[in-house]
Image (cartoon, rainbow, N blue to C red):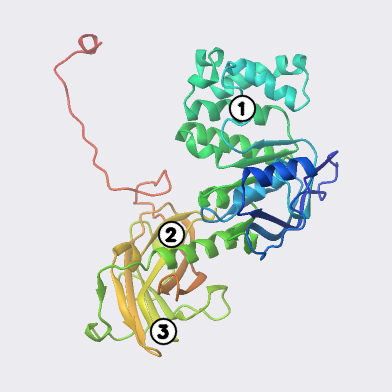
């Protein structure tokens, strides 16, 4: 069923989008004869089976809801079914089974430039887009100046769209989409082609729209965007829901799974028997029991410590201090190509630092069942003062026997800035040099 557009409700708790058991199945046989038969006799795909012979299921029984005025992200690998799902919600594609309902005026940025006539100028396409959305010519007259200003492509607005770069096309398309006062804004990776300044401008505007009650549904590979913008998120894999819930938890599960798969590819590795034997710290360890974990635990972070430069256990540091995370990795079963690492996140959930064996391309060749390895990670906290959370994790294997464990919020790190230190104005303090000199040239001569 395609989405049914209904008048937007004034109730803030109203559901803007309802997706219930949506499935989309394609036939492998797409011959001209079959297409002709469907056109002549009205045969549709309603009788197609998800597991039927000669069929491909792009989306399998996906269900979720998005309240009015929320931002909702959909993430997943290429070919997972994200765009197919979004097209069903936008009404440009019909589901094989299931129902989808969208309330209010919907504006969708799906395929870049869709709905634009390449022979028309940018100005003409702006009015065409307005007409498609049921907006009168006179109303578009009032909106055009703002659209032109936001797109910021200069005289190209009077040139045929076929002369535009992808970035220019996206600028106009997004400017139109946000100007028509949608109740629901649907975006499919369209912003990824823009330059960073325009992306930042779009991000600010989307925050404003959501604050005003617009519902945002976005498909993206940019997990930092999901963390920064969305309240809820869906991870879709091979057409099925892998995770649905709070955006931060969804992104962490997705990133952990992708890191475990991609990060354990063949790389220089250390033989277990040749590893140096060390003594575990005698200071208090981090309390891991009761914390939220992701993964199946075939390998797991059994114990962990966070140490100060003097070797003491601490979660309080000064800007510029060195910290050491020590992870005791336990193999529940024999595993190969094992890795371990950590991530620091700020109060917005953004990853400001991440490293580990995978990043260093130094894996543990094999850990026998029941055995442990100690991984030590030392890093400098050149960060803005404030609180940060520390995630710890490990993984092993490849696609067939992949296993991982991730401990969320293993520690809350407090970074203070003593009075005698310089102020950190940005997120991080990078190494830098500043020079001062004189010149024999006068200012007038330079001009």
- The answer to whether any part of residue 27 appears in the image is yes
- Which residue was labeled with disc 3? 330
Contact check, label 2 and label 1, Cβ < 8 Å:
no
Disc 3 or 2, which lies upstream in sequence?
3
- The answer to whether any part of residue 389 appears in the image is no
Q: Is residue 28 left or right of residue 309?
A: right
Q: Residue at x 78, y 18 (%)?
A: 136
Secondary element at tag 1: helix
Secondary element at tag 3: strand
Task: Choose between 49 and 368: the one closer to the eye.
Answer: 49
Task: Looking at this view, name the residue that lies furthest to the bottom.
Answer: 370
**Can you give x and y, in whole percent of width and height, for residue 61 in the image?**
71, 61
**Can you give x and y, in whole percent of width and height, for residue 164 in the image?**
49, 22
Give neighbour class at mark 1: few <14, some 14-19, many 20+ (Cα, 10 Å).
many
Q: Quadrant of residue 69?
A: top right
- Which residue was labeled with disc 1? 175
Q: Residue at x 39, y 55 (%)?
A: 418
Q: Is residue 399 left or right of residue 123?
A: left
Contact check, label 1 and label 3, Cβ < 8 Å:
no
């Amino acid at each position: 069923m395609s989405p049914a557009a209904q008048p937007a409700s004034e109730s803030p708790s109203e559901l803007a989008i309802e997706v219930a058991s949506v499935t989309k199945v394609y036939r492998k046989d797409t011959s001209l004869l079959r297409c002709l038969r469907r056109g002549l006799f009205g045969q549709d795909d309603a009788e197609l089976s998800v597991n039927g012979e000669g069929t491909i299921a792009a989306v399998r029984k996906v269900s979720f809801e998005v309240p009015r005025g929320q931002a909702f992200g959909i993430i997943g690998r290429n070919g997972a079914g994200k765009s197919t799902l979004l097209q069903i919600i936008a009404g440009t594609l019909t589901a094989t089974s299931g129902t989808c309902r969208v309330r209010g005026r919907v504006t969708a940025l799906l395929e870049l430039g869709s709905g634009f006539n390449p022979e028309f100028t940018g100005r003409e396409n702006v009015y065409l887009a307005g007409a498609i959305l049921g907006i009168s010519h006179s109303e578009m007259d009032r909106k055009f100046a703002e659209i032109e200003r936001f797109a910021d492509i200069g005289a190209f607005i009077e040139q045929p769209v076929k002369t535009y770069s992808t970035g220019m096309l996206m600028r106009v398309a997004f400017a139109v989409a946000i100007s028509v006062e949608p109740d629901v804004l649907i975006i499919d990776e369209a912003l990824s082609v823009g330059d960073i300044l325009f992306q930042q401008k779009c991000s600010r505007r989307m925050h404003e729209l959501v604050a005003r009650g617009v519902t945002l549904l976005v498909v993206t590979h940019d997990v930092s965007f999901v963390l920064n913008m969305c309240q809820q998120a869906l991870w879709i894999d091979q057409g099925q829901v892998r995770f649905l819930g709070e955006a931060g938890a969804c992104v962490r599960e997705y990133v952990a799974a992708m890191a475990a798969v991609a990060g354990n590819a063949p790389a220089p590795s250390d033989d277990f028997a040749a590893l140096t034997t060390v003594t575990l710290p005698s200071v208090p360890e981090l309390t891991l029991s009761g914390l939220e974990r992701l993964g199946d635990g075939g390998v797991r972070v059994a114990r962990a410590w966070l140490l100060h430069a003097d070797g003491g256990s601490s979660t309080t540091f000064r800007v510029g201090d060195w910290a050491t995370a020590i992870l005791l990795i336990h193999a529940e079963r024999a595993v190969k190509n094992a890795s371990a690492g950590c991530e620091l996140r700020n109060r917005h959930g953004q990853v400001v630092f991440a490293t580990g064996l995978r990043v260093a391309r130094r894996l543990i060749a094999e850990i026998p069942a029941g055995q442990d390895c100690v991984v030590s990670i030392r890093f400098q906290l050149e960060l803005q003062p404030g609180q940060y959370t520390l995630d710890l994790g490990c993984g092993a294997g490849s696609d067939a026997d992949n296993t991982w464990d991730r401990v969320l919020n293993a520690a809350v790190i407090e970074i203070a800035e003593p009075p005698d230190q310089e102020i950190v104005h940005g997120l991080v303090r990078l190494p830098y040099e500043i020079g001062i000199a004189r010149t024999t040239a006068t200012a007038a001569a330079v001009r």
